[in-house]
Amino acid sequence: MIQILGAALAAAVLTAPPAYDAAAWRGDLVRLETELEARYANLAWMGSVESGVDVPSLVRRAEVALRAARSDTEAGEALRAFVAGFHDGHLSELTTLAPAPAGGFEPEQPALDPLDPVTGCASIGHASTASVAFSLPFESLPGVRLLGDGQDSVFRVGLAEVDGRRLGLVRIQAFRARAFPQACRRAWAQAREAGRPITRAELGEAAGRLWLKALADQLKTLRGAGAEGVVVDVGNNSGGDDSGDWIARLFGSRPIASARLLVVDAPAGRAYLDEEIADLTDALAAKPNVEARRALEKALAQFEARKAVLGTRPCDLSWVWRERRAWRDVACRRMVEAGYADGPLPGLPAHAYGDVRSEQALAWSTAVQDLQGAWPGPAYVLIDRKTFSSAEMFSATMRDNGAAKIVGGRSGGDGCGFMGDAPPLTLPHSRLRFRIPNCMRLRADGTDEVAGVAPDLPVVPAEAESDRARAARVLRTISADLGR
């Protein structure tokens, strides 16, 4: 019996988790602060009074919590609370990884069956990953009629009769074509009809084009149906890709200028600059016409000059852990100019150089140059606290260019996330992993888009008010504004 008990005790000692190491956890906090100083694009903004974030208080709370912690679980929660306190959805925890399995392998891609577009589109990632329904239940109100439900059609679209005015309603639940599987199925059908091979790459490109064209067509349909204004619903929209900037060109008749883009003065920023330099170099190698070549050479010289200054301007951001400063007084932000959200240029007129390859290397939004101005009238963008990332880019671009008024509540505040490769941070002791944004978009007033977009026409939840009642209030607010 004694031998059995001894063996059991020995086994328990061997399998017991390691003792809580308070010093190692404090070291993880210091490492996290150091890495944020080095490569977090929004750190200087977060240190500003205007951000509304009290970073020194976050540090103090984390240090107090770590001193009080008695387990890895408590210490982990202290670091998570520290990161969450920045209120930046792009600065967030990733899954902690287990060691690589022995003999692991990547499964082969399944063959695409030309007769099975449903499975095929799903297998390449086209799926409704966000709510197709409007973010407020407009569909349930009297006087609202759907023209497309977003299931059989690409977009959910409708008309609303409000106080004698007719409003168009368009739901954009995500700014990525893959979230709209009907666009993929249409691309699949067109490829089959034309006898073209059905491949992943061609389907992805074709679905993206069809998705954008479907939106333009729906806007034209609303014009033809007599809509006096259009409501673009991007509430409960987690974001997507650069289409958030492009789609702004479908609205209004005036030119749209994209936000200034900056990347962090670190290797993560260098990766994006290298990518742009490569794209511009490839466009020049295609031997464009004289005007396009001059524009490409100028843009290339600018990006090479930006890359040359990386790491040459010392910038101490350690003050953010101790004090708060006014944004205008923060001269050193550890950021490098990187053109615009639209690429090297803030935009281009349609067919500016008669050379699509050069135009798209200079301004990515030329992908929609044949769709510009599909809706020329008054536009309203509906946002809420779950409007993030690319949806904020769209909202801010529309507002800053006078293409729309913003309705609803303040957006969630993610701003720019990642341009190019941005490897996550793995802390040495805890192995907690965090992704760190490497880019910043600046609004027309010079503020960081991560602050969120404020509404011109606030319509926020009220006590004892149903979602249906608030939906009706949004439409009445817009109708009254149109009347003014």
Image (cartoon, grey):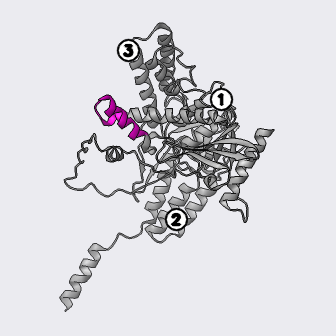
Please tell me whether residue 195 belongs to the stretch shown in magenta: yes
Vertical arrangement, residue 133 with respect to residue 222, above or below: below
Q: In the drawing, does residue 312 fall left or right of residue 466?
A: left
Q: Inspect the image, locate mark 2, and give the three-letter code of the amino acid beneath it.
A: Leu
Rendered view: 405 above or below 322: above
Instruction: Name the residue located 48 percent from the left edge and 42 percent from the top edge.
Output: 154
72 or 155: nearer the eye?
A: 155
- Crowding around mark 1 (Cα neighbors within 10 Å: few <14, some 14 to 19, many 20+) is some
- Left or right: 457 with respect to 55? right
What is the number of the mark on residue 66? 2
**Identity of the amino acid at label 1?**
Pro
Residue underneath mark 3? 285
- Kindly identify the residue that appears in the image at 78 percent across and 44 percent down: 480
Q: Which residues are magenta?
A: 183-203
Question: Is residue 295 visible in the rendered structure shown here?
Answer: yes
Q: Nearer the viewer, mark 1 or mark 3?
A: 1
From the image, state whether disc 2 or disc 1 is nearer to you.
1
Residue 468 position, x and y percent, is 67, 58
Q: Secondary structure at mark 3?
A: helix
Give the quarter of the figure containing the N terminus. Answer: bottom left
- Of marks 3 and 2, which one's residue comes earlier in the chain? 2
Residue at the (34%, 71%) spot, across then down: 17
| Residue position marked by numbered label 1 in the rendering | 376
Amino acid type, callout 3: Ala
Mark 1 and mark 3 lie on one chain; the one further toward the N terminus is 3
Q: Main secondary structure of the magenta part?
A: helix
User: How far separated are the C-alphas under marks 3 and 2?
Assistant: 56 Å
As drawn, the residue found furthest toward the top would be: 290
Q: Quadrant of residue 464?
A: bottom right
